[in-house]
Amino acid sequence: MTMGSDDQIPQVSSDDERRSAAALARLAALHPKLIDLGLERTFHLLAKLGNPHHKLPPTVHVAGTNGKGSVIALMRAMAEAAGLRVHVYSSPHLCHFNERIRLAGTLISDGGLADLLEEVEQANGDTAVTFFEVTTAAAMLAFAREPADLLLLETGLGGALDSTNVLDSPLATVITPIARDHEHFLGNDISEIAQQKAGIMRSGSPCFVSRQEASAASAISAYASKIGTSLIMAGDDFDWQDLPDGSICLIQDRKNTSLPKPSLYGAHQRDNAALAAAVMLHCFGTNRPAQMIAGIASAIWPGRIHRIDDGKLTALAPNCEIWVDGAHNAHGAQALAAALPHLASGHWHIICGALNTRDPREFLAPLSALAQNITCLTIPGQDASLSAIELSDAAKEIGLEAQSAKSLEAALIDTNEAASSPGTPIIICGSLYLAGIVLSANETPPN
């Protein structure tokens, strides 16, 4: 069965939805750990499935700490604007697992997903395998079977030991900004984290690298020299400048190329747009370059400095603009803090939820100068969530006016009532899980 082709509209079926949910639940129970980095189990499972990773379309493999999804969204928009058929693998999802697998422009259907998962489950048997490993194998099957011109493949965690790192010769690799995150898996040393991310490089496949801290850049360069691959690094091999009309001048290969103003908000998205354009023009520059460049202005990446559309949640706070962002670490908070003044002047109401895997003060500190107040939530359904009280206590420790709320809906109602004037903006942030809950509750999920 061909899944996700342009002329096929996925059929909504409660039975298919139940089948895919049941398969995901069964597969999640096969390994006692959610994350157990390593490639042996992935290769073993892929071999049982006929090695679909050897039959993929030309692939751009993307690793990094922040910006992976945005760069992929921009590359996808550019490729599709040039008429290319594009597969995408990304994680985590916001509202529905299907968001992780996009086949030639269309999210995989519940029926297609259920069929894949059941096939992988049958091939795997009761062999221990992590949830991410088995779902990555299912995605590889889908991508191998559906024709496309390009696959954009995002790592889940790290790089060298990530389950996506099974390709022999990707078209290109990309490394976005590296920062401290997931320290309990990757450590605290930026240089060591960069070495993990650099593990997706392959000899003979160019690697495009965003601006990095000096220690990260040094580790990446050393790994590239070790395996004998070429680096194309921001600031050295390509760069960009702002133009008066809001567009961007990309400087690459001694050539200036005008790029449109990115549709994604934030100054950091201009770095991401330049990186995406450098990759796509290098790999596909002879394929309708003008149309490809125009795609930068139409990229969509939900949950990332994203003003939510009218829905159930916006009706609770009619006096306020409501924005949502999935940034969850200090680097992401800095980018968010730099972007918010360009969206609205003055202070913001902040509604925040966070996991207990990192110090919340590191996330809240960059936002403190912009915060009129902060309302803290326990993220529903997340065992690893900080409690609303724990988060509000952390906010108070760094001088923020903070309170807790029992629910997202209560937080919005309270914030709306406290708004000093119509249009006072709200930013809901601190976790991608919370961003997904927002979009689901508002009934405006990604599509």
Image: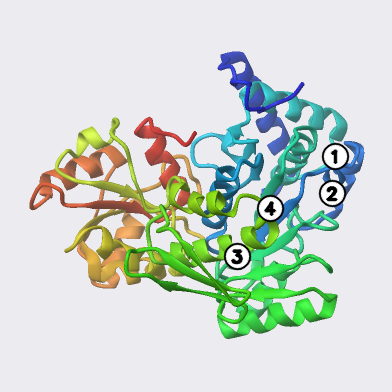
The residue lying toward the viewer, choosing from 310 and 383, is 310
Give the CA distance from mark 1 to mark 2.
Answer: 9 Å
Q: Which image quarter: residue 399?
A: bottom left
Amino acid at circle 3? Ala
Amino acid at circle 4? Ile
Q: Please, is residue 440 above or below residue 34 in the view?
A: above
Q: Which residue is mark 4?
A: 35
Q: Where does the N terminus fall, quadrant-wise? A: top right
Amino acid at circle 2? Arg
Q: Earlier in the sequence, mark 1 or mark 2?
A: 2
Mark 2 and mark 3 in contact? Answer it, CB < 8 Å. no
- Residue 21: x and y in percent read 62, 27
Q: Earlier in the sequence, mark 4 or mark 3?
A: 4
Q: Which residue is mark 1?
A: 127
Mark 1 and mark 2 in contact? Answer it, CB < 8 Å. yes
Give the CA distance from mark 4 to mark 1.
Answer: 16 Å
- Residue 391: x and y in percent read 35, 59
Q: Which mark is residue 41?
A: 2
From the viewer's perspective, tell me whether residue 50 is left or right of residue 113: right
Q: Residues within 10 Å of mark 2 (few under 14, many from 20)?
A: some
Query: Secondary structure beneath disc 1?
Result: loop
Give the CA distance from mark 2 to mark 4.
Answer: 12 Å
From the viewer's perspective, tell me whether residue 31 is left or right of residue 346: right
- Give the number of the mark in front: 1 or 2: 2
Mark 3 and mark 1 in contact? Answer it, CB < 8 Å. no
Q: Residue at x 58, y 43 (%)?
A: 80
Q: Residues within 10 Å of mark 4 (few under 14, many from 20)?
A: some
Q: Which residue is mark 3?
A: 278
The residue lying toward the viewer, choosing from 23 and 314, is 314
